[in-house]
């Protein structure tokens, strides 16, 4: 996620949100408590959020990251974005050489890569701006995305697993029906441009805690009636706690009724009290395994096709006591 956000409910380096808590199965709890036993919950994939530091990654760095995810059971990686446009420190994108190293590492490990489009930082100002600002963003960003997709070589790779739109959708900014229609038309244009190159199109969604007349389930009813998207539902537990899962139940009911395929995203971090309330500075650490196990149990029962985590890097890979404890519990 971007490192600076206008919405105080949005974290920057990390966020994702999802559904309702389920009780642990006694047998699963007993197995997980045995020394050396990995948890019974499956993990199908992980997000990988690149920053400028990834521009210096060597093939060994990409291999290390992919192999850690594979040892967790992941068979897919979602590259959250291919670069950031309009950021405070200027534009940057992962060069083809970097993405080639990622695809080579993924192919060797039997992992597929869902490629995120470049993220436009203007997204935050556009959502909070007037109608003219929002419509200008939609027009400009759609044209740039079409040009980028037209030259992207990744669908020809055997490890290619589809496209990801790096814009997270919530009900706070999209309560107005007119703006919902503009959003649907924009997403339809992005989806068509992506489909023309091969591969489906996924986008994340989460429940915003900000007071609003908007309704997340109603928003997705509108979008899915017009655009064939693959939703990825963030559980939001890393910031809002396990109670956030209940807020997502109406959205899951929409997906079940429509027969919509979707993925669930489990957050491996917890927000620390030092985080700025406006979302401009995120303080977090790797979460406790007991909490994550409940999230994974919920995700398996949510109806999701795949259960992804956010994210192996950094919340499982970093050199901290909390991350080391998670690796031990997962037998990594």
Image: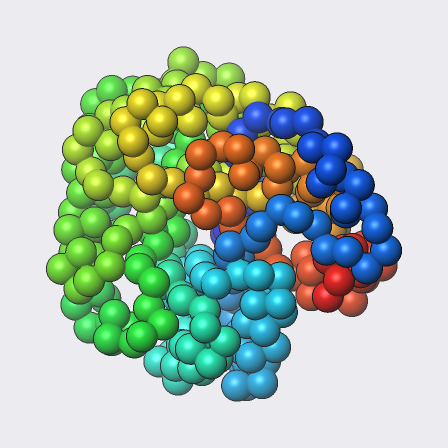
Residue 81: x percent and y percent?
41, 60
Numbered-mark total: 0
Side of 25 where 18 appears, left or right = left
| Residue at the image point whose x is 57% and y is 67% from the top | 70
Q: Is residue 34 above or below residue 96?
A: above
Side of 72 where 291 appears, left or right = right
Side of 87 where 273 appears, left or right = right
| Residue at the image point whose x is 53% and y is 21% from the top | 247
Residue 230: x percent and y percent?
32, 43
| Residue at the image point whose x is 24% and y is 25% from the top | 222
Let me know if residue 2 appears in the view.
yes
| Residue at the image point whose x is 48% and y is 41% from the top | 264
Extreme residue toward the front, this view: 27
Q: Nearer the viewer, residue 255 or 195?
A: 255
Residue 267: x percent and y percent?
61, 45
Q: Nearer the viewer, residue 103 or 73?
A: 73
Let me know if residue 130 appears in the view.
no
Q: Nearer the viewer, residue 204 or 174?
A: 204
Name the quadrant of the C terminus.
bottom right
Look at the image and name its color scheme: rainbow
Q: Is residue 118 above or below residue 101?
A: above
Residue 172: x percent and y percent?
43, 25
Extreme residue toward the top, this view: 213
Q: Is residue 312 above or below residue 106?
A: above
């Amino acid at each position: 996620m971007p490192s600076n956000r206008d919405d105080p409910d949005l974290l920057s380096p990390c966020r994702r949100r999802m559904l309702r808590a389920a009780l642990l199965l006694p047998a699963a709890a007993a197995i997980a408590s045995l020394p050396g036993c990995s948890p019974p919950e499956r993990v199908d994939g992980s997000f990988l959020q690149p920053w400028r530091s990834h521009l210096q990654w060597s093939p060994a760095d990409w291999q290390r990251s992919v192999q850690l995810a594979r040892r967790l059971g992941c068979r897919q990686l979602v590259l959250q974005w291919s670069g950031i446009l309009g950021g405070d420190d200027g534009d940057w994108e992962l060069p083809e050489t970097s993405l080639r190293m990622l695809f080579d590492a993924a192919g060797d490990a039997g992992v597929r890569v869902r490629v995120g489009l470049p993220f436009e930082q203007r997204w935050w100002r556009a959502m909070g701006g007037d109608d003219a600002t929002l419509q200008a963003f939609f027009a400009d960003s759609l044209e740039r995305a079409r040009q980028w997709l037209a030259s992207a070589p990744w669908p020809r790779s055997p490890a290619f697993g589809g496209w990801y739109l790096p814009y997270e959708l919530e009900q706070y900014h999209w309560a107005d029906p007119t703006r919902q229609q503009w959003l649907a038309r924009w997403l339809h244009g992005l989806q068509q441009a992506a489909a023309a190159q091969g591969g489906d199109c996924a986008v994340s969604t989460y429940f915003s805690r900000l007071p609003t007349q908007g309704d997340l389930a109603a928003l997705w009813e509108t979008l899915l009636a017009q655009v064939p998207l693959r939703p990825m539902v963030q559980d939001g537990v890393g910031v809002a706690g396990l109670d956030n899962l209940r807020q997502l139940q109406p959205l899951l009911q929409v997906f079940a009724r429509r027969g919509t395929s979707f993925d669930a995203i489990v957050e491996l971090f917890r927000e620390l009290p030092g985080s700025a309330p406006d979302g401009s500075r995120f303080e977090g650490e790797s979460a406790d395994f007991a909490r994550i196990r409940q999230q994974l149990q919920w995700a398996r029962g949510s109806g999701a096709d795949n259960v992804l985590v956010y994210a192996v890097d950094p919340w499982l890979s970093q050199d901290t006591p909390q991350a080391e404890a998670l690796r031990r519990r997962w037998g990594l």
